[in-house]
């Protein structure tokens, strides 16, 4: 039994976690056609309530943020009511749950939100190649560069979604600033060629992320606000060595916000990035001195070692939690885990 993982962790004066294992956010594409969470989803999350903290699957803040089929939202009353069932089920079993707030930016597609109900927005009008997973016939579109007015509205909509999250009973929110989606699109040079106050320099490129953070903190408080970041570009995104300065600046700014935590966004933390001088988790640890969540192809054993070596404070587990609803109790008892397989994505077990 990896001891450190099972010690409680005080995030701040408002939140203490029973253990250091987080369920990573995992998109499952199982909300109903109004993007309302279902009872099946509530049961799925409740089965995992012994995680120190569950981060919900990415949840869109408004219709034009949708890039995949049947991903849940947090902008209608029905969606808030659906999430209430989920959060109550988790709380009834002694768990805690944050909502991950998502706008996919240039990865969105009007197929989901309807032509005429918005445009595909990004930092700049730079598209990505290819087609949407599970909807292979849909080519990604060239996005429109968000105007100043669009940005003001987006910041307001993130804050409203955070407010809705608390109304739905979530313990807090994790802003999805990672994995090549909207916020991340402002943070990397390969997709931000703006020449206004949101482009060209680290201060400007970090501005949108910081405005979203500050808007949410003003609504729900810093102790219930967290952010996920991918300083290393690896998904729907090209790396650029100049990105380093953007994250150096952003992390300094975030320290003064006293957030609940920063969560690395990556699939395999063994990946090394030239411009970060190595692993993304090591880069974050060096440039940010508050609570850090590590993730990315760790086992309980390797994650526990990393916590003991002070590489990060909390461990998020993704795929193994899909395969093992009872992940925490299995690890606690030293029982063998069921291996993850992509075929498991077809069903909420
Ligand atoms: C993910 N991941 C992910 N990340 C995120 O920030 N929001 C999301 O909604 C999702 N959705 C998602 C779905 C599926 C099916 C997978 C496999 C992954 C990434 C996830 O949170 C995590 O970072 C990775 O899975 C790496 O952790 P593991 O699986 O190696 O423990
Ligand atoms: C795999 C189908 C899941 C439905 C959409 C989920 C979208 C979230 C992204 C997770 C998909 C996993 C892809 C792994 C990319 C690894 C990059 C190194």
Image (tube, rainbow, N blue to C red):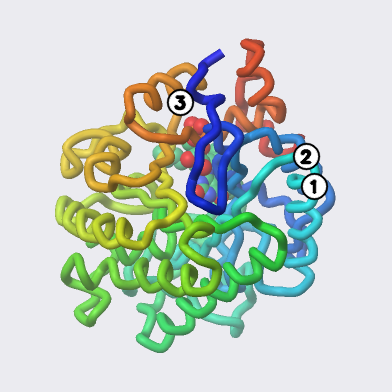
Q: Residues within 10 Å of mark 3 (few under 14, many from 20)?
A: many
How many residues crowd mark 2 within 10 Å: few (<14), some (14–19), many (20+)? few
Rendered view: 108 above or below 307: below
Q: Is mark 3 within 8 Å of ligand 1?
A: yes
**Which residue occupies the foreground of this view, 290 or 129?**
290
Real-space Cα distance between discs 1 and 2? 7 Å
On screen, residue 62 versus residue 270, left or right, reads right
Mark 1 residue element: helix
Q: Report x, y in % for residue 192.
A: 27, 68
SS at mark 3 in the image: loop
Residue named by callout 3:
298
Q: Is residue 84 above or below residue 310?
A: below
- Spot occupied by residue 41 in the image (x, y as percentages of width and height): 76, 47
Q: Residue furthest front?
A: 13
* Residue located beneath label 1 in the image: 89
Q: Are marks 1 and 3 in contact (CB under 8 Å)?
A: no
Q: Where is residue 325, by image quadrant?
A: top right
Residue 50 in sight from this viewpoint: yes
């Amino acid at each position: 039994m990896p001891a450190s993982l099972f010690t409680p962790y005080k995030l701040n004066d408002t939140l203490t976690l029973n253990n250091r294992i987080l369920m990573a956010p995992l998109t499952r594409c199982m909300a109903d056609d109004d993007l309302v969470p279902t009872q099946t989803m509530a049961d799925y999350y409740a089965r995992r309530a012994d995680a120190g903290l569950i981060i919900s699957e990415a949840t869109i803040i408004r219709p034009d943020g949708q890039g995949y089929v049947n991903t849940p939202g947090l902008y209608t009353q029905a969606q808030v009511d659906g999430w209430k069932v989920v959060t109550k089920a988790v709380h009834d079993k002694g768990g805690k749950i944050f909502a991950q707030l998502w706008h996919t930016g240039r990865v969105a597609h009007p197929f989901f939100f309807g032509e005429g109900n918005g445009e595909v927005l990004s930092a700049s009008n730079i598209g990505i190649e290819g087609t949407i997973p599970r909807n292979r016939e849909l080519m990604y579109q060239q996005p429109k560069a968000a105007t100043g007015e669009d940005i003001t509205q987006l910041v307001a909509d993130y804050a409203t979604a955070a407010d809705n999250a608390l109304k739905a009973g979530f313990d807090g929110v994790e802003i999805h600033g990672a994995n090549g989606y909207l916020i991340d699109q402002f943070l990397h040079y390969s997709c931000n060629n703006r020449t206004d106050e949101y482009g060209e320099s680290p201060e400007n490129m970090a501005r949108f992320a910081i405005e979203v953070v500050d808007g949410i903190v003003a609504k729900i408080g810093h102790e219930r606000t967290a952010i996920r970041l991918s300083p290393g570009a690896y998904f729907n995104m090209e790396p650029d060595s100049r990105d380093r300065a953007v994250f150096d600046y952003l992390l300094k700014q975030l320290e003064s916000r006293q957030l609940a935590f920063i969560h690395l966004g990556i699939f395999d933390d063994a990946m090394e990035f030239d411009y970060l001088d190595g692993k993304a988790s090591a880069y974050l640890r060096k440039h940010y001195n508050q609570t850090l969540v590590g993730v990315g192809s760790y086992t309980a054993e390797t994650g526990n070692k990393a916590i003991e070596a002070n590489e990060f404070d909390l461990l998020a587990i993704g795929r193994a939690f899909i395969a093992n609803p009872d992940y925490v109790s299995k690890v606690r008892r030293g029982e063998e885990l069921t291996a993850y397989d992509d075929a498991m994505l077809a069903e909420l077990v």
